[in-house]
Image: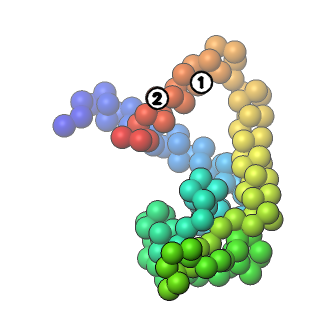
Amino acid sequence: MPTSEAAAIAVELRTAMGKLTRRVKDEDRIPLGQAAVLGALDRNGAMTTSDLAADQRVRPQSMARAVGLLMEQNLITRRAHPTDGRKSLVELSDAGRAALEAERGRRAGWLAQAIEAELTDEERALLARSAALLERLATR
């Protein structure tokens, strides 16, 4: 059972992270679900639609729709699976990689500007140290 101090920190952190996430999403031009698929393909390389669905924790039918939308936009391509003729792999196209990089740049750019405009040097140093702690919590 967490201490009341840990519980209070958790509530404040969840609230602040939710607000920050929503604000950063305002910079998005690609819908969140589609950006997540592009990001997974960027991190993991070519994947089957069912592997993407498992990675993103969605139903295969939902992933099939997302893959179809991304293919219509030429952001991903499909090719035959090298060892299983019943399957196909989807991967980022050059346009998909460029769109993902632009999306990431918009998000990071807004956040960097906000950090410079709102935080003192001391607060920036504290935030940099906190990022490592947040990463550790996220991978628990």
> In the picture, residue 115 is in which quadrant?
top right
Above or below residue 140? Residue 37 is below
Which amino acid type is shown beneath numbered disc 1? Ala
Q: From this viewpoint, which residue is outermost toward the bottom? A: 86
Q: Which mark is residue 133?
A: 2
Point out residue 12 in the picture as x, y percentages from the top left corner: 44, 36
For disc 1, the marked residue is 128
Q: Is residue 123 left or right of residue 129?
A: right
Is 59 displayed left or right of 120 in the figure? left
Q: Residue furthest top?
A: 122
Is residue 99 visible in this depiction of the protein?
A: no
Examine the rendered structure and indicate whether residue 98 appears above or below residue 70.
above
Look at label 2 and name its amino acid.
Leu
Q: Is residue 96 visible?
A: yes
C-alpha distance separating marks 1 and 2: 9 Å
Q: Earlier in the sequence, mark 1 or mark 2?
A: 1
Residue 24, image x, y percentages: 67, 48
Judge by depth and name the residue closer to the eye, 11 or 85.
85
Q: Judge the density around disc 1: few (<14), some (14-19), many (≥20) Cα neighbours within 10 Å.
A: few
Q: Quadrant of residue 80?
A: bottom right
Residue drawn at (77%, 75%) of the image: 74
Residue at 19% in and 37% down = 1
Q: Which of the two residues, 24 or 49, is positioned nearer the viewer here?
A: 49
Q: Is residue 85 left or right of residue 103?
A: left
Question: In which quarter of the view is residue 64 placed?
Answer: bottom right
